[in-house]
Image (cartoon, rainbow, N blue to C red):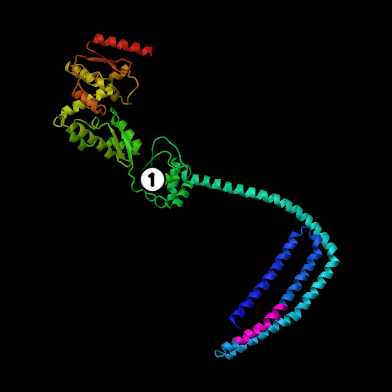
């Protein structure tokens, strides 16, 4: 049998199967399109019989048509492959004959039974057709009603599904916002320290406790998603307000960041005030700072060992940028070094070789700084005190009393305060106090070195932000009276 003949056989088999399939499809299509099933029950049964007959007829045609060709194919196969194996070819023929015999036996045995079954089915269905039709009719009515409801429900289902999808997207967006972009607002900067050995969960919980993040769970999820939960760097951080979780994670995992803090020492602060300010800023005990200001080696650099007990007056007021983990010792050294560089080491002031002049200058400058914040008045006030010293008059400077008070400065001094027993009480003692009473700024120091020459020996506040300077006591009393009038008018 040629390859063309085999292709023809396979083609016909395909067409037969296609015919069968199309019959099945047409059958179910006709049933579905019938609309009212009860009217076509008998038609349906007849279609089944017709389909069975057509199927059996197709089988017969197949056998009658292709059995000879199969035999011819087998013979041709035997001729072509006789040289290879006679036994194999004989087996093929034997199997083919057995196959054809089996097909014949199948037809003889089961086709009559199928026909008989179809006839019985038709006969029995006739008996139960009325009952069947009634049942089908009831079922159909219920089915149609359900179908209508189903259509309505289906429409709602689409609405529900669409709503659920939108809701899901909104929930996902909300969760994504919470995880990635949730932030907390606060004023200023926050210092946060991560100690070595702390787990990520502990760090996240601490961040929430400190008010840096709103929710540690969302922060943990963000870190897991970003793969940064194991990349947190142990150190001290300066955290800005409104960091979201992603921004915070970038900060906590960036090894290139160098955290510095702006630290301002304003003119006129005392050591105790600087200690309190720095302790609050850098989270250490202010007593440690105060102790560092008693550093003998630094005092010795001033040439004042044995003359002063600490560095009061010699910590330069300015705005600095310090590392976040700076120590009290380092702060003291930096403030002192800035003073040394700008005041002592400068040839402009001539104080390097004269420790006594240095001490007197800074002490008087601290009093001037305590009296006024107006730079324009500073040289005049310095001239007043120098005139009083020349005239062998007590300085009677209120800032020295404020410094001497055991409980710290007062809003308003009392007469009893002027009698306090202290070497810093310039109402009782002549000359300058033993040392500076604060840390004066550069302008105050320059005002002493370049004081204004005049004959004033008194000054009193005007009540308007400045001072009135007088040369006689009578003028001074008039100025005081004027001051009191201005205060009453307010």
Q: Which residue is mark 1?
A: 251
- Name the image quarter holding the N terminus: bottom right
Q: Which residues are magenta?
A: 60-76
Relative to 71, is 416 on the left or the right?
left
User: Which residue: 33% across, 12% down?
Assistant: 484
Observer-nearest of 326 and 183: 183
Please determine whether, in this image, residue 119 is positioned above or below residue 162: below
Q: 76 or 267, which is in the foreground?
A: 76
- Kindly tell me whether residue 18 is visible in this rendering: yes
**Which secondary structure type mostly characterizes the magenta part of the structure?**
helix
Q: Dot 1: few (<14), some (14–19), or many (≥20) neighbours within 10 Å?
A: some
Quarter of the image where one finds residue 346: top left
Question: Does residue 488 appear left or right of residue 294 in this picture?
Answer: right
Count numbered badges in the picture.
1
Q: Nearer the viewer, residue 303 or 150?
A: 150
- Which residue occupies the foreground of this view, 488 or 103? 103
Which residue ends up furthest to the left in the rendered image? 353
Q: Give the quarter of the image for residue 447.
A: top left
Q: Quadrant of the C terminus?
A: top left
Say whether residue 423 is left or right of residue 85: left
Percent coordinates x, y for residue 68 in the rendering: 67, 84
User: What x and y, as percent, mark residue 198?
Assistant: 40, 50
């Amino acid at each position: 049998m040629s390859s063309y003949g085999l292709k023809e056989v396979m083609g016909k088999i395909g067409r037969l199967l296609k015919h069968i399939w199309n019959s099945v499809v047409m059958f179910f299509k006709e049933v579905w399109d019938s609309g009212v099933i009860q009217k076509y029950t008998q038609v349906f049964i007849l279609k089944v019989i017709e389909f069975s007959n057509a199927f059996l007829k197709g089988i017969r045609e197949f056998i009658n048509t292709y059995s000879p060709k199969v035999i011819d194919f087998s013979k041709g196969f035997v001729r072509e492959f006789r040289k290879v194996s006679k036994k194999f070819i004989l087996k093929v023929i034997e199997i083919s004959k057995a196959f054809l015999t089996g097909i014949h036996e199948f037809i003889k045995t089961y086709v009559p039974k199928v026909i008989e079954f179809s006839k019985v089915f038709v006969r029995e269905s006739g008996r139960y057709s009325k009952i069947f039709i009634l049942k089908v009719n009831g079922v159909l009515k219920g089915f149609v009603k359900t179908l209508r409801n189903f259509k309505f429900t289906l429409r709602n289902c689409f609405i529900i599904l669409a709503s659920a999808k939108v809701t899901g997207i909104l929930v996902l967006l909300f969760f994504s916002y919470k995880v990635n972009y949730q932030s907390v607002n606060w004023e200023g900067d926050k210092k946060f320290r991560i100690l070595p050995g702390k787990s990520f969960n502990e760090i996240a919980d601490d961040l929430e406790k400190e008010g840096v993040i709103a929710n540690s769970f969302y922060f943990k999820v963000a870190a897991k998603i970003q793969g940064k939960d194991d990349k947190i760097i142990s150190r001290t951080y300066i955290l800005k307000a409104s960091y979201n979780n992603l921004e915070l994670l970038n900060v906590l995992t960036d090894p290139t960041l160098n955290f510095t803090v702006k630290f301002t020492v304003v003119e006129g602060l005392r050591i105790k005030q600087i200690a309190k300010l720095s302790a609050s800023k850098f989270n250490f005990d202010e007593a440690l700072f105060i102790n560092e200001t008693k550093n003998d080696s630094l005092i010795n650099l001033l040439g004042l060992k044995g003359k002063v007990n600490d560095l009061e007056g010699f910590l330069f007021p300015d705005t600095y940028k310090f590392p976040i983990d700076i120590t009290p010792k380092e702060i003291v050294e930096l403030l002192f070094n800035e003073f040394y560089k700008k005041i002592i080491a400068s040839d402009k002031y001539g104080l390097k070789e004269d420790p006594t002049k240095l001490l007197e200058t800074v002490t008087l400058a601290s009093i001037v700084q305590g009296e006024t914040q107006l730079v324009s008045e500073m040289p005049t006030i310095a001239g007043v005190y120098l005139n009083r010293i020349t005239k062998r008059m007590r300085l009677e400077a209120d800032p020295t009393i404020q410094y001497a008070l055991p409980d710290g400065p007062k809003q308003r001094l009392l007469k009893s305060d002027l009698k306090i027993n202290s070497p810093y009480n310039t109402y009782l003692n002549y000359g300058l106090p033993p040392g500076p009473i604060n840390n004066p700024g550069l302008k105050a120091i320059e005002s002493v070195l370049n004081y204004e020459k005049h004959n004033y020996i008194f000054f009193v506040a005007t009540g308007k932000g400045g001072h009135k300077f007088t040369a006689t006591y009578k003028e001074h009393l008039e100025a005081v009276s004027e001051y009191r009038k201005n205060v009453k008018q307010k």
